[in-house]
């Protein structure tokens, strides 16, 4: 019952490509307002800069399956920045023109056309990065890896063309449907995307190698830690050395965010495998102390894991209490109904 954790890749402020199991979406907009178009419809997000306050408004699909919102999501400034004038085209190198054309097609969600253009710009770091993202989105794993390899080789140039054209962009890979983390177009961003590909094509050793490199780059990054401990337990969950390593890596984790709460879930699973059920119960109770604005799926997983831990401790009344509360929230969750005899 493992969560599938992805990441949110931020290229620059303002534009976000959200890639998830339900399909990709793209967001563009200035600070304080953003529009996202994806397979679930159009969402307008606005905020008050400096206040931390945001709002989200969702517009679903019509019954025909078409979009009720606009198919092109770009403000006037973005459209202007991605349009090369006649004289500018005369002096702009062909590969750079292809990069701009690819970004423009991406902003209009024309993925096939975007990839055609971006393939002509892959010796530019930004072109390779975007080509990798679009190829990944289209499940062209081998091609995406090839593009990301080029982006890694030239990672010091990542972001240069976004800055040049004043394009505010961001790309995202949700951790779950509700948990995301933002990164920039850097070596870190490419490695995180490549890690997802290795996991997708069942190459755990390659994924762990990417995460090891990321741990050296960003030792305090909770997203990287979460991905690392998740993969360790998914692949080597019954290995005591792997579980001990997870416990060592997570020894000082507190319940600051939903990312940290998810890390505590994996810490508890490692502790249970090591036979340390009381410690596992403490970790899960800590993770459940904050429930406001936490993804329901994460809260359900934490409560289910704690109920199993109570059973292992012989505290059947407390286990049943957690199972009952979980059943009331989600009657079809795992084998809860069977355990309760309902």
Image: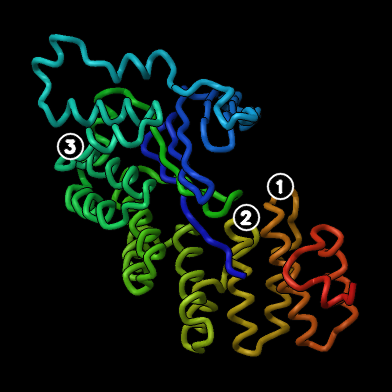
Q: Nearer the viewer, residue 59 or 195?
A: 59
Does 278 sit left or right of 129 as displayed? right
Please report contact status of discs 1 and 3: CB closer than 8 Å, yes or no: no
Q: Which residue is mark 3?
A: 121
Q: Earlier in the sequence, mark 1 or mark 3?
A: 3
Report the residue at 22% width, 48% height from top.
Answer: 151
Q: Is residue 13 above or below residue 308?
A: above
Q: Nearer the viewer, residue 93 or 156?
A: 93
Task: Count neighbours of disc 2 (C-alpha within 10 A) and say few if under 14, some if 14 to 19, many if 20 or more.
Answer: many
Residue 24 in the image, given as x and y percentages of width and height: 47, 41
Q: Tell me the SS state at disc 2.
A: helix
Q: Earlier in the sequence, mark 2 or mark 1?
A: 2
- Nearer the camera: disc 2 or disc 3: 3
Residue 288 in the image, given as x and y percentages of width and height: 74, 62
Report the residue at 43% width, 38% height from top.
Answer: 17
Does 271 sit left or right of 28 as displayed? right
Q: Tell me the SS state at disc 3.
A: helix
- Rounded to the nearest angstrom, the CA distance separating label 2 from label 1 is 9 Å
Q: How is the image coloured?
A: rainbow
- Nearer the camera: disc 1 or disc 3: 3
Q: Is residue 153 above or below residue 275?
A: above
Q: Which residue is mark 2?
A: 258
Q: Tell me the SS state at disc 1.
A: loop
How many numbered marks are there? 3
- Rounded to the nearest angstrom, the CA distance separating label 2 from label 3 is 38 Å
Specify the label residue 293 is tagged with: 1
- Within the image, what quadrant is residue 45 found in? top right
Report the residue at 87% width, 68% height from top.
Answer: 324
**Residue 221 in sight in this render:** yes
**Looking at the rendering, in which quadrant would you find the C terminus?**
bottom right
Task: Count neighbours of disc 3 (C-alpha within 10 A) and say few if under 14, some if 14 to 19, many if 20 or more.
Answer: many
């Amino acid at each position: 019952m493992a969560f599938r954790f992805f990441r949110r890749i931020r290229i620059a402020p303002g534009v976000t490509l959200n890639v998830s199991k339900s399909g990709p979406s793209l967001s563009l907009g200035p600070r304080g307002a953003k529009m996202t178009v994806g397979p679930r419809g159009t969402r307008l997000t606005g905020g008050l800069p400096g206040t931390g306050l945001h709002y989200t408004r969702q517009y679903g699909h019509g019954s025909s399956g078409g979009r009720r919102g606009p198919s092109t999501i770009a403000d006037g400034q973005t459209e202007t920045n991605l349009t090369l004038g006649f004289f500018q085209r005369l002096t702009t190198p062909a590969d750079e023109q292809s990069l701009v054309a690819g970004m423009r097609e991406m902003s209009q969600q024309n993925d096939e056309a975007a990839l055609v253009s971006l393939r002509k710009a892959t010796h530019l770091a930004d072109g390779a990065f975007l080509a990798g993202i679009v190829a990944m989105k289209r499940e062209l794993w081998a091609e995406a890896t090839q593009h990301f390899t080029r982006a890694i080789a030239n990672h010091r140039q990542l972001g240069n063309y976004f800055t040049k054209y004043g394009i505010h962009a961001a790309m995202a890979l949700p951790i779950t449907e509700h948990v995301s983390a933002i990164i920039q177009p850097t070596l870190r961003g490419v490695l995180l995307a490549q890690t997802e590909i290795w996991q997708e094509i069942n190459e755990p050793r390659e994924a762990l190698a990417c995460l090891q490199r990321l741990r050296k780059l960003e030792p305090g990054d909770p997203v990287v830690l979460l991905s690392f401990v998740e993969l360790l337990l998914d692949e080597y969950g019954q290995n005591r050395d792997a579980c001990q390593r997870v416990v060592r890596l997570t020894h000082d984790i507190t319940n600051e965010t939903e990312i940290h709460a998810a890390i505590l879930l994996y810490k508890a699973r490692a502790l249970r495998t090591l036979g340390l059920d009381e410690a596992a119960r403490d970790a899960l109770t800590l993770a459940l102390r904050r429930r406001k604005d936490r993804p329901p799926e994460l809260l359900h997983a934490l409560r289910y894991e704690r109920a199993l831990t109570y059973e292992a401790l012989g505290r059947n009344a407390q286990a049943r209490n957690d199972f009952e509360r979980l059943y009331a929230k989600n009657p079809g969750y795992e084998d809860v109904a069977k355990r309760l005899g309902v």
